[in-house]
Image (cartoon, rainbow, N blue to C red):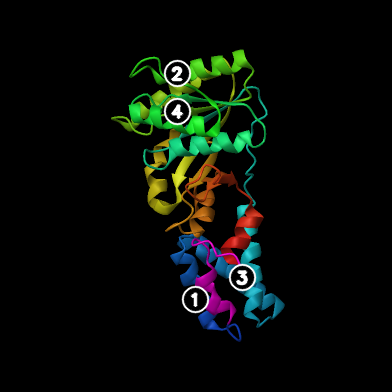
Amino acid sequence: MAERASWSLGSALRGIFGARTIDEDTWDDLEAALITADFGPAVTEEIVAQIRSQVERFKTTDPRDVQRMLREVVEERLAKYDPTLKLTERPAVVLVVGVNGVGKTTTIGKFARFLRTFDRSVVVGAADTFRAAAVDQLATWAERAGVGIVRPEREGQDPASVAFQTVERAKRDGTEIVIIDTAGRLHTKGGLMDELGKIKRVVEKQAPISEVLLVLDATTGQNGLAQAEAFLEHGGVTGLVLTKLDGSAKGGFVLAVQEKTGLPIKLIGQGEGIGDLTGFTPHVFAQKLVG
């Protein structure tokens, strides 16, 4: 038996599903498990109420039915959002945004590798020019992923001009997908959003922007979401990437974050390796989460 993912509810739910019958403790324990897993109070209440009414309707007393119902309810709620990456334009331009420290640069390297496994040609643009370390780190990941990179020609170069040069190169070389790294922190949030707006305007003079992906650290849960508020409000985000969905991450956050933002999760990262970023599949996730 493969080891269960540490973010799964498996151990928390084992007692409930292994009981002899469904009673009041079942509902208290289920509620506690979901709250602990970071589903959030509102979502927890709705899920428990929905399963409770199904149990009454079908007059079942078997706790394993609760497990099946929970899996179905979670999958149904996750599947309300379309996780498909929209990358049909040529070149397809993807902006990657997020606060510093969430694993944004690493994610870009892994995403480039993910696309290469589907034989897509990729170039990345190092438009986080405020941090020299970010440019060097991105170059290392680009090399590991086997993709090209456009670096700033000088320190502190205008990020929008780096983005422009990256799209220009993709069009010249016939590269299919452009991934652009953007700054995660400036002195003011307003400045950061202005910068992002400028990058978008400059890029769109050459090619439409296919996706704006917001990277969130799954281990920070609701706190990470609060930190990313400015991006959600002004960044034109089209989808989410959850990194570090291992270790101390709480699986319920995956559902809560889609419902809170109204945005689909498009990619999830579950490890440190370059191949550890994958597309998000609600059915598979619900199965792993609930068991």
Residue 129 appears in which quarter of the rendering? top left
Q: Looking at the picture, how far across and down is residue 273, in whole percent?
A: 50, 45
Residue range (magenta) = 1-18
Q: For this rendering, which residue is in front, 177 or 213?
A: 177
Amino acid at pointer 4: Ala
Task: Report, in whole angstroms, how far the alpha carbon at label 4 lies from the one at label 3.
Answer: 49 Å
Specify whether 88 is left or right of 191: right
Residue bearing mark 4: 139
Mark number, residue 29:
1
Q: Is residue 102 left or right of residue 29?
A: left
Q: Percent from the top left, x then y, of residue 131?
A: 33, 28
6 in magenta: yes
Q: Which mark is residue 162?
A: 2
Spatial CA distance of label 3 from label 2 is: 52 Å
How much space separates mark 4 and mark 2, taking CA atoms? Answer: 14 Å
- The image shows residue 130, relative to residue 65, as above or below, that is above
Q: Is 228 above or below relative to 124?
A: below
Question: Is 258 placed left or right of 36 in the picture?
Answer: right
Q: SS class of the residue under badge 4? A: helix
Task: Say whether disc 4 or disc 1 marks the residue closer to the N-terminus.
Answer: 1
Secondary structure beneath label 2 = helix
- Visible residue check, residue 236: no
The residues bearing labels 4 and 1 have C-alpha atoms spaced at a distance of 48 Å
Return the residue found at the far bottom: 20
Closer to the chain start, of discs 4 and 2, is 4
Q: Amino acid at mark 2?
A: Val
Type of the residue with mark 1: Asp
Which label number is shown at residue 51? 3
